[in-house]
Image (spheres, helix red, strand yellow):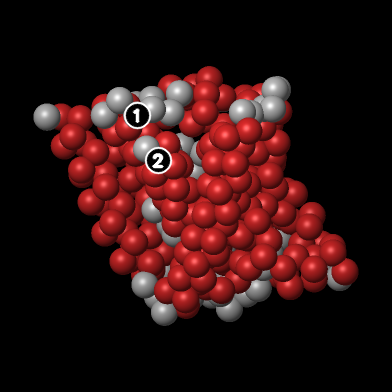
Amino acid sequence: MMWFIIILLAAIQGITEFLPISSSGHLVVVQELFRQFKQPLPESEILALDVVLHLGTLLAVVVFYWRRIWGLVVRDHRVIALLLVGSIPAGIIGIALKEQLENVFANLPAVGCLFFVTGAMLLWADRHPVGQATYRELGFGRALLIGLFQAFAILPGISRSGSTITAGLGAGLRRDEAAAFSFLLAIPAIAGAGLIEGLHRFKTPPDPTFAVMLAVGALVSFLVGLLALWWLVRWLEKGRLHWFAWWVFAMGAGVLLWQLF
């Protein structure tokens, strides 16, 4: 049963981290379902697994965008500064409001409502006129604005990729450039959160058997995440973001009905 739970959570993380449907929102819902059915994983192990699965999806971003990342290292140094500026809001809010955010993660009706916010953003983004700018042409003000949308996505039910791609399109970027900047911006966000949580959760080495499970979970989240990232970029280029909106609307309605009845 533990293997099933870990692989299921890894697959969900890999899919939802990149598709604009909120990985945190889905994991909150799934973990609550596990609690309802007396899941065998202790809370501490679920939190440790969450850290490792995020690192698996981080590796997927690095592999998918390795050419762009190499370009940042050798020539596009200004873009590194843009990414650092865009990372500031999430860093400040994540640290300053950590306890308040944990309360939101425990509030399923709030998560259900936030799914609707994600859906509304996706519908707006799909209908917004497509810009022609590249992320290299962004100013620091627009990079900070996209970073504010990323900080908003700390809330479960708000998609990080959906909100940052929406902000990028609103800033006049081409669809492929908005996606690329969104996921490059995810690297410091995921790495920073993973480092902070990892230092907190892994003060002592995990049990060898559980360590193997964590490694398998990371591999699954990496492979599924790589496929999901490819899928999102293709659908974004074809103007199909609204397809994901209907999914998050259904998730929001389902969560609210579950909590109501």
Residue occupied by mark 1: 39
- Where residue 152 appears, as percent x and y from the top left, is 50, 41
Which circle's residue, 1 or 2, is located before the other in the chain? Answer: 2
Q: Residue at x 36, y 72 (%)?
A: 240
User: 1 and 16: which one is in front?
Assistant: 1
Above or below: residue 94 compared with residue 44: below
- Where residue 100 appears, as percent x and y from the top left, is 49, 22
Give the position of the C terminus as an image quadrant.
top left
**Residue 202 seen anywhere in this rendered image of the structure:** yes
Are dots 1 and 2 in contact, CB under 8 Å? yes
Q: Marks 1/2: CA distance?
A: 8 Å
User: 194 and 40: which one is in front?
Assistant: 40
**Residue at the extreme left of the image, as rendered:** 261
Query: Which numbered dot is residue 5?
Result: 2
- Left or right of 159 on screen, residue 256: left
Instruction: Classify mark 1: helix, strand or loop.
Output: loop
The amino acid type found where label 2 is placed reads Ile
**Residue 25 seen anywhere in this rendered image of the structure:** no
The amino acid type found where label 1 is placed reads Gln
- Left or right of 242 on screen, residue 182: right
Q: Residue at x 41, y 64 (%)?
A: 125
- Where residue 62 appears, as percent x and y from the top left, is 68, 61
- Where residue 218 appears, as percent x and y from the top left, is 58, 49
Instruction: Classify mark 2: helix, strand or loop.
Output: helix
Which image quadrant is residue 90 in?
top right
Which image quadrant is residue 257 in?
top left
Above or below: residue 4 compared with residue 136: above
- Left or right of 119 on screen, residue 12: right
